[in-house]
Each structure stands twice: as C-alpha cells, then as structure tokens.
Image: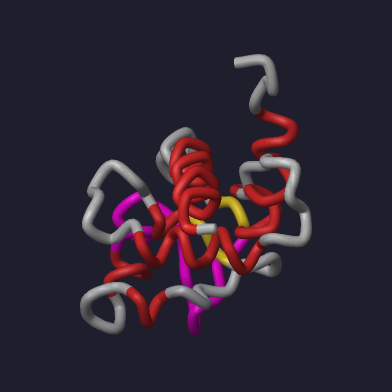
Amino acid sequence: MKKTNDNFFEKAYGVARLIPFGRVTSYGAIAKFLGAARSARMVGWAMNASHNDETVPAHRVVNRVGLLTGKNHFDGTNLMQQLLENEGVVVIENQIQDFDKIFWDPSEELDLEN
C-alpha cells in the first residue's frame, strides 16, 4: 500500500510543479486529472508531505472554493498566504479573491499524453 501511495504522491507532485506562478488549483482538480476523482484528501496528504521538497509549490493547492485549508501545515501560520501574495494572489481571511479567474485546471491545461 505504501508503494501505491508513494507513486500517487509523486504523480500529484508532478502536477503541482506545473501550476503556473500566480495561479492556484484544488486538491480535487489534481485528483480528477490523475484519474482518482474521489482522492482529493490523498492529494492533500501528498501536499502536506511535500514540505521538505522545495520543488513542489504546495501553497498553490487549495480547497475547491479557494480556502487555504492547508495553511496549518506550513511553518508559521501565514506562510501559505505570504507565498501566494508574493505571487500576486490576493487572500482575505484565508479566501483567495477572484478564485475563478486564477484557478488553473490541469484537466483543461495539460495534455494527458505528455
């Protein structure tokens, strides 16, 4: 089972690494892209486990309505928000503003063949 999780985590990291600067996606959008639509929580676990890997921009992955639900897993309470704001993303009370405009959907943006 651990091997399967590790493989899924690596796939989730691969998608997260493709999220453009200043854009965000959701746990569910990554799960759906990976063919595991009901595994949003597992994507969350993957993002939480990625904090020792600076190549994974886990701060760009939020819940389906743009809330910073993963912020408690970053060092310091506001690090996730600060990282997003450094990319020009506006966050008010843990809610990404203009979420629909900056949302990046890997199912629409990425070619499954690549």
Q: Residue at x 52, y 77 (%)?
A: 69
Where is residue 83? Give x, y as percent.
30, 60
Depth check, front residue: 88 or 35: 35
Is 22 colored magenta in this rendering?
no
Q: Residue at x 62, y 43 (%)?
A: 104
Find the magenta span and give its range: 83-98
Where is residue 63? Give x, y as percent.
62, 68
Q: Is residue 36 above or below residue 71?
A: above
Quadrant of residue 79 in the image? bottom left
Horizontal relation, residue 9 to residue 27: left or right: left
Where is residue 5? Give x, y as percent.
51, 54
Q: The N terminus is located in which quarter?
A: bottom right
The colour scheme applied to this rendered structure is: secondary structure
Q: Is residue 107 above or below residue 7?
A: above
Horizontal relation, residue 81 to residue 46: left or right: left
Q: Is residue 95 above or below residue 83?
A: below
Q: Is residue 112 above or below residue 46?
A: above
Badge count:
0
Where is residue 110? Give x, y as percent.
64, 26
Depth check, front residue: 39 or 24: 39
Q: Residue at x 43, y 60 (%)?
A: 47
Please, which residue is most extreme toward the top here? 113
Horizontal relation, residue 12 to residue 54: left or right: right
Depth check, front residue: 54 or 59: 54
